[in-house]
Image: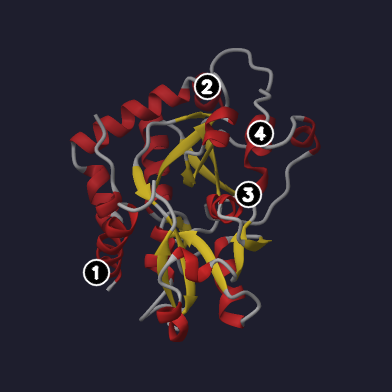
Amino acid sequence: MFKKKIMALGLALTMSFSLFGCGSGSGNATEAATAAGNEGASAEVSTDGSDLAKVKEKGTLVVGITDFEPMDYKDDGGNWIGFDADMAAAFADNLGVKVEFVEIDWDNKVLELNSGNIDCVWNGMTLTDEVKSAMDCSNPYCNNAQIVIVPADKADQYQTEDSIKDLSFAVEAGSAGEAEAQSHGFKSTPVQNQAGALMEVKSGTSDAAIIDSLMAAAMVGEGTSYADLTYTVGLNSEEYGVGFRKGSDLVGELNSFFVSSYADGSMQKTAEKYGVQAALIEQK
């Protein structure tokens, strides 16, 4: 059911995108992170040697994530799984180290990274100009979009951008969804994560939400916890990437890993496991 949904969503959005051009958890930045500056800043932690050498020395790759199905989420045993989680674990194994997932406040992702609390941000992160100015980023690996979520029984009323302009939107703080709401001049309320945005619509606190299309395919519609919600308007098209500290030599390592894992088919196999194969970008 999930794979069919995401393929259908992809076809629908392809048509929408011809007309037009992430996830959060709980957790706080440390005092050192606060001193590093705001998200738009490009402050760097003091380094002696490479990030790659430091990761290998400590034996752990610390990955900043949020609860964002199908990219990063917990299974029934409390283990982090998802396309991004599995790929991060495979990358760590390729480096000869273990992976450690740390749930972060998405609005503080750059602070957590620059403070040294995490080694990378790997969580369906949209490669916006702001993100690319604050971090060194991997090559894009997945296509995505920001889409509008509304109650299913009202969907026929909200099929165009003009029809949704007066709605109140719930958006994840610091996300691409919030940026889209602001760029379109929509009235919006920031919440902790995309799941919270869906809950706002379900409860009637907000008229609509703006979330990632990949999350919508997993979380919204028939057979999900939000069967009474659906997606309508596609607002943009975008790409996902992994973020590292400025100057990090882990970027090149990950790009090389992406190329090899795409070439041997393991990246595609992981994508198929979580139903995101239609969004995968060829790595070469």
User: Which one is closest to the eye, mark 2 or mark 1?
Assistant: 1
One can see residue 104 in this view: no
Dot 1, how many residues are within 10 Å of its Cα: few (below 14), some (14-19), or many (20+)?
few
In the image, residue 275 above or below residue 109? below
Q: Which mark is residue 174?
A: 3
User: Which element is circle 3 on?
Assistant: loop
For this view, does 147 lie left or right of residue 57?
Answer: left
In the image, residue 34 above or below residue 11? above
Residue 167 picture location, percent across and down? 59, 71
Residue 44 picture location, percent across and down? 66, 23
User: Which one is closest to the eye, mark 1 or mark 3?
Assistant: 3
Which residue is at a point 68% across and 29% down the rendered structure image?
Answer: 41
Q: State the quadrant of the N terminus.
A: bottom left
Q: CA distance from mark 1 to mark 4?
A: 38 Å
Residue that label 2 marks: 248
Q: CA distance from mark 3 to mark 2?
A: 23 Å
